[in-house]
Image (cartoon, rainbow, N blue to C red):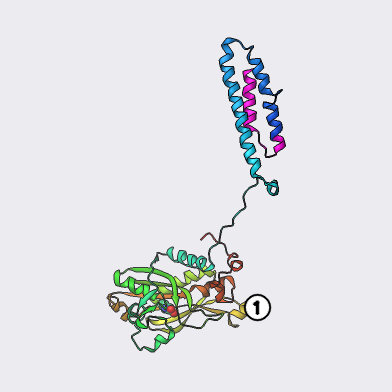
Amino acid sequence: MIDKIKEHINKVNLFKTVDPKEINSFRIKYLGKKGLLNKFFKFFKDVSGKEKKSFGRELNLLKKAVNEKIKTLQALAESFDEASTDLDLHRPGYHSGIGSRHPLSIVKNRIVSIFSQIGFNLSEGPEIEDDWHNFTALNLPEHHPARDMQDTFFLRKNPDILLRTHTSSVQVRYMENNSPPIRILSPGRVFRNESISARSHCIFHQVEGLYINTQVSFADMKQTLLYFTEALFGKSKIRFRPSYFPFTEPSAEVDIYWGLETETDYRITKGTGWLEIMGCGMVDPNVLSNCGIDSKKYSGYAFGMGIERIAMLLYQINDIRTFFENDIRFLKQFSSTV
Ligand code: PHE
């Protein structure tokens, strides 16, 4: 008989409903005049002295369990008003979608990881710069006409404090505080006072690289950049076009051969098959000496590219402004684990 009571205690504990009718029949089943508890109590009188104690204890436990169950179920039922009776507590919760990385971060991370495999370390610096680190140390003295290549935002009408126009400023800071060999990559946000259009923006992102050691040659740079374009674009044909930057000599623009297979290829390469992807050159000896590096002993190369431009090519995006609009429909198309 004791086992039977224990079985009931179990059943009571497992019983679940929010239907008041069911709660009532549960109550009657156990506590009613002809209910189970009364039945057991009647039986109790005839239990032998030995068993009486444990029988009584189990019986009390059952009574307690029934009373408590009724109390909680009634409270639960009350909190279910008419409108929410079809609420299903067992239904799994709504899935709140996780975000995806911004396409610019995806591309930046890929570039960083490609260069990190050949020993380039990350180096970052401030977005608010002084004239020395952004211009003068880079062989762009005051009134140098090449300053016009990068229209600048100045802070508080103080011509010495500005928003960096490229991340070459980070390289200057690094050279000032470290000695060769130097192999760094500086990704970051840069600012230029340009009007906003589908092709250009006043805020964009760059990755610049710098390698300084003894006997660094133009051929070293070519090989490194070829490795990079193969890894990122899967294209192994590149060319170097002579160009001009005040901080490198000689300087070049790097083009990759994109191909002319589709109509889009014709459009983005203007029918030539070639696409310009970055600027580069051998670091001007003046820049090395400005940063305290012996330019007779050391040489180096530098390169720089716009992340937006690369991302636009990789994802076939034709308006740079989409990167800054935070439109979820645009952003959720990109997913990546890097
Ligand atoms: N700093 C240049 C720019 O912003 C890019 C560059 C970097 C070119 C290093 C050559 C060497 O346009």
Residue 270 to residue 14: above or below: below
Pointer 1: what residue?
Answer: 263
In the rendering, at what x and y percent does residue 13 appear?
A: 62, 31
Outermost residue on the front side: it is 33
Along the horizontal axis of the image, is 22 left or right of 211?
right
> Can you give x and y, in whole percent of width and height, for residue 321 in the image?
55, 76
What residue is at 65 percent from the left and 78 percent from the top?
263
x and y percent of residue 278 in the render? 47, 77
**Residue 185 included in the magenta stretch of the image:** no
The residue positioned 48% from the left and 75% from the top of the image is 204
- The type of residue carrying mark 1 is Glu
Q: Is residue 179 left or right of residue 18?
A: left
Residue 166, located in which quarter of the rendered image?
bottom left
> Relative to residue 326, is residue 95 depicted above or below?
above
At 36% from the left and 88% from the top, the residue drawn is: 144
> Quick check: which quadrant has ligand 1?
bottom left
Badge 1, how many Cα within 10 Å: few under 14, some, many 20+? few
**Which stretch did the figure color magenta?**
1-22
Secondary element type, mark 1: helix
Q: Main secondary structure of the magenta part?
A: helix
Q: How many numbered discs?
A: 1
Left or right, residue 229 beside residue 17: left
Residue 28 falls in image quadrant: top right
Q: Is residue 280 visible?
A: no
| Closer to the camera in the image, 72 or 228 | 72
Answer with the quarter of the image where residue 61 lies. top right
Task: Please tell me which residue lies in front, 310 or 218.
Answer: 310
Residue 263 appears in the figure = yes
Give the left or right position of residue 307, taking residue 32 as reference.
left
Residue 180 in the image, given as x and y percentages of width and height: 31, 69
